[in-house]
Amino acid sequence: MVSTYVNPVYAFKPSHDQTANPPTHYPVLIVGGGPTGLYCALDLAKQGIPSVVLDEDNTVSYGSRALCFSKRTLEILDRVGCGQAMVDKGVTWQLGKVFFHERQVYEFNLLPEDGHQRPAFINIQQYYPEEFLVNRIQDFPEIDLRWQSKVTQVKKIGELVEVSVTTPTGDYRMTCDYVLVADGANSPIRESLGLHSSGQIFNDTFLIADILMKADFPTERWFWFDPPFHPGQSVLLHKQPDGCWRIDFQLGPNADRQAWRDPEKVRPLVKAMLGDDIEFEFEWLSVYSFRCRRMDSFIHEDRILFVGDSAHQVSPFGARGANGALQSAENLIWKLARVLKQQAPAALLNTYDQERSQGADENILNSTRATDFITPKNRVTRLFRDTVLELAEQYPFARPLVNSGRLSLPCTYENSTLSTADAVTDKFPKTLRPGSSGKDAPIKALNTAHSAEPWLLPQLGDRFVLLVDGRALPTEALAQLEQVTDLEIVVIAEQITTNYTTLKDSAGLVAERYDLQPGTAYLIRPDQHVAARWRQIHVDKVLAAMQRALGKELV
């Protein structure tokens, strides 16, 4: 096999903590240097919180692993300065096609509207985002990233957590206020604490074949049910950077996993799909089965917080693994930062478990349904699937039933205790209701100290924002709210009329997507989710909504 990527090797450096007595104390320790752990460290650093990241390896991932990164994930990575690198390197796509036997029966467009900075999806091998995150960490002295540092024990002692570490030059201990466990789906820390995940284990076996080839296939997601080149099974084709293509082959429940790791066994399968005229070489092979499961609670003993795959796992169909993990990390970090800064009670962290349990359940439900459709378990379910595929070719009503993986979408935190419900008299549309992630739109920044990029979402995040339609500004109310800690007032207006950050709605899409009317205001959380919205601002209502969003009503 050949490779287009050379893994960087990061040097182990002994730490002064190895000889510290008593053990050194940190606000946050992070177990795991994958995308989730690295993102957590960066997001904390941006908010002034130092951390130590402990990873037992000395490099980034081997193999492509997580491949499809969603629009929402790119927007999250934008906030730590890695989104553009992802887009520059990745393969952008938004069109998917579904085939039954040799015929196309359905296609879908994941981002049919214009006016967004980021595409619906990009394909990029996981080692690239990890490398981008590691490189970005070098800009933050608040982050101590330690390689070849294996965490062997996590133990709560009183109000602190003690972490034991093994390194090439000796073992040592540290303490922290909170430990974030991001050590992957098989989480040794989770197992060592006697914690378990519940859900469904699927018996079907799948093969990932990353191949290098020159082909003029369009940059689309192609999914085959029961194709002539692999009868009775399913196949998925994706384009990756570097002339690399990923092919997922369903192998069935009784496949010999070890045998299918042999490139010469896989070669006839690929040739049957591509034909004899296309030359290719293997870059990476992986054989896997998968689980859809999660922990009952992502918080253990108040101060041990599980995030990413260590907390929840899904099948790869729908690109919900890495995307869900980074959405969980974003949800956790803004809350943890405010607890550590004593701007919010510790009870706010419980809403991480509440909101991201909902997100995990949505991902697991969608992944399970996709898997059941892709791998029918009996004659009746196969008949249903095949009938749906036949009908989808000609009848639009059947197309929403085709399930080759419902692609990842941001979670709307329905019924979150942090949200303030719309007043009945305000009459907002359902879109962008409290709990929703904000929508992007083109803008012109007229006087902002923040990002001057011509897009709305980069102006939001990292703090609370009161986004106000400037056609009927309540100047007296805003003057009072201007004094509120961690709140910035941002006005949508055609020209600067106040000292507040002013954005021009350059294409009219902010007004359209947020249903702005004169005086309309949105309270946006630090993770760019809507906390509350009103047709007219009242100081007491805004203050109450912000207190609720900070979890102060939970005490």
Image: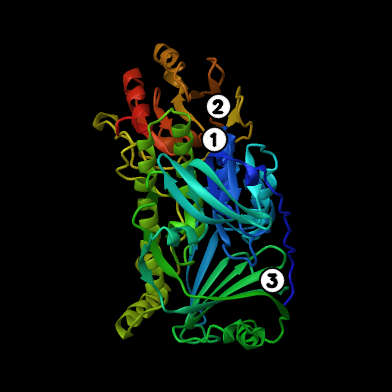
Quadrant containing the C terminus in the rendered view: top left
| Residues tagged 3 and 2 counted as in contact (Cβ below 8 A) | no
Please tell me which residue is depicted at 36% across the width and 22% down the height of the picture: 543
Of the two numbered discs 3 and 2 on the same chain, state the one appearing first in sequence.
3
Residue 48, position as x, y percentages in the image: 57, 32
Residue 483, position as x, y percentages in the image: 46, 16
The local secondary structure at tag 1 comes to loop
Number of on-image labels: 3
Q: Which numbered disc covers residue 270?
A: none
The local secondary structure at tag 3 comes to loop
Report the residue marked by disc 1: 456
Amino acid of disc 1: Leu
Quadrant containing the N terminus in the rendered view: bottom right
Report the residue marked by disc 3: 216
Of the two numbered discs 1 and 2 on the same chain, state the one appearing first in sequence.
1
Residue 244, position as x, y percentages in the image: 68, 69
Q: From mark 3 to mark 1, how far is it between C-alphas? A: 36 Å
Q: Is any part of residue 399 visible from this angle?
A: no
Return the residue nearer the eye: 334 or 271. 334
Residue 204, position as x, y percentages in the image: 44, 79
Report the residue marked by disc 2: 503
Q: Is any part of residue 422 visible from this angle?
A: yes
Seen in the picture, residue 288 relative to 76 is either above or below; the reply is below
Q: Quadrant of residue 215?
A: bottom right
Q: From mark 3 to mark 2, how far is it between C-alphas? A: 43 Å
Q: From mark 1 to mark 2, how far is it between C-alphas? A: 8 Å
